[in-house]
Amino acid sequence: MKKMRGVTLTAEWSPKPEFKLGAKDIDKVSTYLGSLVWKNPRIEIRDYDIPEPGPGQVLIKIKACGICGSDVHMAQAKDDGYIFYPGLTGFPCILGHEFSGVVVKGGPGTKDKVTNKPFKGGELVCAEEMLWCGSCKPCADGYPNHCERLDEIGFNVNGAFSDYIVVPDRCLWSLEPLRDRYKDEKDIFLAGSLVEPTSVAYNAVIERGGGIRPGDNVVICGGGPIGLAACAILKRQGAARVILSEPQADRAEMGLKLGADFVIDPTKTDFADEVLRLTDGMGAALYLEATGLPAIVYPGIEKAIWEGRTLNSTVVVVARAEEKMPVTGEVLQVRRARIVGAQGHSGHGTFPRVIECMASGMDMTSMITKKITLDEVPENIIALQTDRKNCKITCVMDE
């Protein structure tokens, strides 16, 4: 049988005393509370058999896969040895979920959404990483991001830092609309690998945040890929002022290229005062918390809401974090503000809408600041634990 390689994360199942096995956890296999269970993570490249697609599955040849902050935090240990990532995890697992590739073949019963016919092979695709069941109550109610039987590619199901992957056909989306925008297929695959993180941003600011009216002000806290994608989306939606709060100079400059009008360095100036200055005292209609540091960031957001003149502000929390946010109920009441959480990217036509935005000119490929090989993935995941200079590091697979 032919072999493939995969960047594999292993860790020890060692639950903390406060951990209780939940209804959706599987003892010694997977949990929704990763940072309370998994200890001493390690990354290595292993050999695997190339998977054969079963009913409803499609075999994909990987062409590009980006390193996500989730990959970094699953591989990063705190002082006590436990991983940083607080969510759904199951190890050992091949990492990688921001990917694009080419269809090799479809299993029995699979169909291409474009033609509604069986896959022929050779189709250019990307995929949702959230493998929702479609039949539990959240899925039936239209919330697949919150599936009660959720699996996630690269978290508890083998991912795309590998040569091949099998994916349910329901989670695949065609990249054919990008052909007119990118003449080189390599660029299509690079753009395709950014559909997933851009869709996370779209879900956060459009689906969960409710979008904005043209002319509204918005504030993005955190210039990682999600925050940068939000800059591009909200400027495209008609924001008057897109304000990015980001201390790292290279990411701040990237934000200005992708749609931010102003950048705040919160380590050098008072965040709320600067937001109010840039908006003539109005504040913003939407604030996105994309730093993963809510205890540090939220007080500044709350001050801007309290002292600003804009009512009905929405704060969207998209970054994963265990820390509690210090919320003052009086501010939410008096200023008619609200806080909402955003998880994932599935449902509501998010993926195809993001692909169409890219096809019509929303180019996100400048976020890719470094290209690497599969062999270089482990060392770069480790490097990103301390070095934030690069925005998106993408593994490009050779033929």
Image: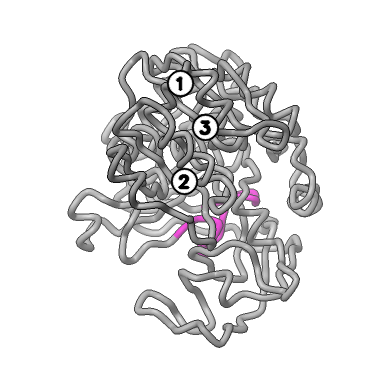
Q: What residue is shown with label 2?
A: 318
**For the residue marked with disc 2, what is the amino acid?**
Val
Query: What is the distance, in whole Å, between disc 3 and disc 2 at their CAs?
Result: 11 Å
Q: Where the N terminus falls, by quadrant? A: bottom right
Q: Residues within 10 Å of mark 3 (few under 14, many from 20)?
A: many
Image coords of residue 283 (percent x, y): 44, 26
Q: Earlier in the sequence, mark 1 or mark 3?
A: 3
> Magenta segment range?
152-165
Q: What residue is shown with label 1?
A: 281
| Circle nearer the viewer, 1 or 3 | 1
Q: Nearer the viewer, residue 262 or 270?
A: 270
Whether the residues at callouts 1 and 3 have beta carbons within 8 Å, the answer is no
Q: Residues within 10 Å of mark 2 (few under 14, many from 20)?
A: many
Asked if residue 186 is among those painted magenta in the image, a careful observer would answer: no
Image coords of residue 32 (percent x, y): 46, 69
**For the residue marked with disc 3, what is the amino acid?**
Ile
**For the residue marked with disc 1, what is the amino acid?**
Gly
The quarter of the displayed image where residue 335 is located: top left
From the viewer's perspective, tell me whether residue 326 is left or right of residue 395.
left
Asked if residue 156 is among those painted magenta in the image, a careful observer would answer: yes
